[in-house]
Amino acid sequence: MIHNTATINLKSVNTTHDKEGSLIAFGIAEFYYRSKEGVVADEMPFRSKGAPAVVINEQGEGVHGTAEGYLDLLVDNSRFAHFKLS
């Protein structure tokens, strides 16, 4: 896996609570990367819990931010790489 920091845009934000009452924010984030065609946008699901979820819920959709994690490259037979930030 490759450690990556990506600029993201929160496209959708949903919330729920766990059994202990902690806030969980989840939804779809759009991230950008460079390919030989230039800057490419892709989407990925996100999930956060506790204090980060509170901030995400307060900011809502359309907010730009930074995501940090490990990037899995999944290559299929169509010659395109699929990205997942975990």
Image (cartoon, rainbow, N blue to C red):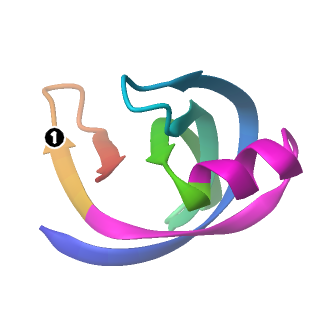
Where residue 67 sits: x, y (%)? 52, 66
| Up/down of 76 relative to 69, above or below | above
Where residue 72 sits: x, y (%)? 19, 54
Magenta highlight on residue 62: yes
Can I make out residue 1 in this image?
Answer: yes
Q: Secondary structure at mark 1?
A: strand
Tell me where residue 80 sits by quadrant.
top left
Where residue 32 sits: x, y (%)? 61, 59
| The magenta segment | 53-70
5 sits to left or right of 19: right
- Mark 1, residue position: 75
Amino acid type of disc 1? Answer: Val
Work out which quarter of the rendered image holds the N terminus and state it.
bottom left
Q: Nearer the viewer, residue 17 or 43?
A: 17
| Up/down of 75 relative to 85, above or below | above
Tell me where residue 27 sits by quadrant.
top right
